[in-house]
Amino acid sequence: MKVKIGIFLCDCGGSLKNIDFPEISRSVQEIEDIAFVDISHNLCLEEGRKAIASRILGKNVNRVVIAACSPASCEHNFIRLLEGLNFNPNLLSIANIREQCSWAHEGNVTGKALDLVGMAINKARLLQPVERKEIPVNKEVLVVGGGFCGMKSALELSQLGIRTTVVEREPILGGRLSELEGFYGFEISPKEMLSSMGEEVKKDANIEMLTSAEITRVEGDAGNFSVRIKRGVKEDSRDFGALIFATGCKAEILPRYFELSPGSKIISQRELVEILQAPAKLERRPEVIGFILDIADENSRLPSLLALNAALAVKNKLGSEVYVFCKNLKVDSEGVEKLYQEARNRGVVFVKFEEKPRISERNGRVKVEAEDILFGEEVSVYCDFLVAEEKGLPSEGTEALASILNTGVDSQGFCQDENVYLYPVGSGRKGVFFVGACRGNLDAARASLDVGSAVMNVYELLALGKAVVEVEKVKVDPQKCRACLTCIRVCPHRAIRLVKVDDEKWTAKIYDLACDGCGICAAICPAKAINFEGYADEQILAEVEAMEWQYGRE
Ligand SMILES: Cc1cc2nc3c(=O)[nH]c(=O)nc-3n(C[C@H](O)[C@H](O)[C@H](O)COP(=O)(O)OP(=O)(O)OC[C@H]3O[C@@H](n4cnc5c(N)ncnc54)[C@H](O)[C@@H]3O)c2cc1C
Ligand code: SF4
Ligand code: SF4
């Protein structure tokens, strides 16, 4: 069929003043295959979308070029519009003349805008339709870990009508929070909060609890995972559409950071909690309790929150003198500044150091010597107990879990994030999410945000019971594939597997729902066996040729 291209130029409400739109329109109209060139002020608004629809239908074009803002801003709206017109969205080519042109340079940029439009036109000529297909997805979700985040995920999914199975390796639910005495950030104690969550979970018909259980194998892709769950000697396979991991972390005092080994006087948060729960067990009331931070991990916020919370608990329950030795107290989490002010008002003394304090034991007490950089003076304090900073570490079995999932771990061994800033709960594998302390040493407020984000992602993926995929947008040619496994190794989304063609030949195969369309495999395949529709070599070369045409013209 002869190519017929409709072109829409948008001046973004008249704001792209350094581009001469009539000049672009005149130049482009000379090109072969162009059915029309329209200049619009706001293609993204209702009136602009209506104009696109009526021109495409009226002129019966089979390719569309839109020269406007970045595809990141509006492409999804244009795709939806074209789908509504029964026009294959893969036949749309976008030129970003706003962020990549008008906004990027000063002075008249009509020449560059013309280059970008010419490139989009040349690419549009070679575009092929890509079939979009609905595939059924399993609406059930597996949550691994029955601590605060695991239970919260299951309850929130249940409210959205999604059934979950929670697998917890311990015989009871609750996780690390159940070990805490005082708890900062919530109005009730952690024990009360967890037991009321546990009751809700038990009553909820949408939630199935499997305690003393672990997963041993995960197969399949987003929407259709098959997971083996081991409980005692029994092992079953179950199917799920998405997997949420809330396996938490552990916290330990690492002796290498302190001159003295942890013992009866250098204690952990948990040991302090035990003292606060039963102070009568002590021979005498401790007169001075110290906290030391920023030795094992200067970047984590949780130790500051814990020390402030525990310092106030010590003041309330024991009335001891409290010293907090720190480099930089982190008070940027919600409400922590207030906690700090309260601690100061209650007489907690903060000693800010630059050089690591010297810690020694004298007459059954711990001596901490530090240079207070605010006063410029040496401070030495004898503590009955020194509560040492604990380092957040990945929980037992995180590496084994990552290998079952075929995902990575970060440099500290925590479950690896897809993109810490843009998509913190995502994993390299579509449909697999990491929430809460398994991503790092998070407080419960931040962990709750993770849960909300993962639940919304799961809902988006599964709620309709079907997902739309672009069929073979990225495709392996089995004739060219040498089964070298390179693409399988590099695919960040684990979307490629080796399959048998016949008795002798194997080929790589891409699974559409798991593929994120990053294009890495197509770029790296040594046999050039992978075609990424829209980014094939000839399509990219055609774009380059368009620039040559421009320069040749000048
Ligand atoms: C001493 C201390 C004090 C704290 N105080 C506060 C505070 O005052 N305020 C605050 O906001 N936060 C506080 N926190 C942080 C808080 O504990 C965490 O934010 C919270 O526990 C995170 O919940 P989670 O569900 O991600 O992990 P967890 O609570 O650790 O739960 C993880 C669950 O997963 C299970 N699990 C692990 N691996 C597997 C597996 N392979 N298969 C099945 N199950 C598995 C574990 O058994 C556990 O039940 C404190 C932490 C500590 C250590
Ligand atoms: S990189 Fe290319 S040749 Fe190698 S397995 Fe993948 S598709 Fe086949
Ligand atoms: S484009 Fe290739 S490398 Fe990227 S997610 Fe899809 S299959 Fe994996």
Image: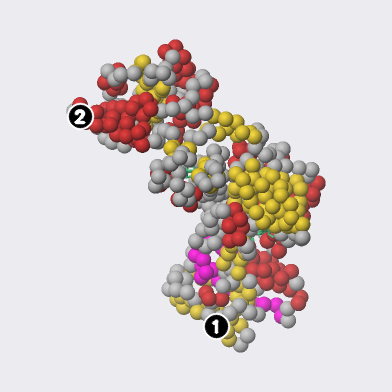
**Amino acid type, callout 1:** Ser
Q: Residue at x 76, y 53 (%)?
A: 210
Q: Is residue 133 magenta?
A: no
Q: Per the image, is 289 magenta?
A: yes
Which contiguous range is marked in magenta?
284-306
Is 237 placed left or right of 129 in the picture? right
User: Looking at the image, is 57 positioned above or below residue 355?
Assistant: above
Task: State the mark number for residue 74.
Answer: none
Could you tell me residue 366's position as x and y percent?
A: 58, 81
Q: Seen from this angle, which residue lies furthest left?
A: 554
Q: Position of residue 159 (x, y in %)?
A: 71, 40
Callout 1: CB less than 8 Å from ligand 1: no
Nearest the viewer among 410 and 226 is 226
Left or right: 118 in relation to 268: left
The answer to whether residue 307 is above or below residue 231 is: below
Amino acid type assigned to the residue bearing label 2 in the image = Gly
Q: Which residue is mark 2?
A: 552
Q: Residue at x 48, y 38 (%)?
A: 475
Residue furthest bottom in the image:
363
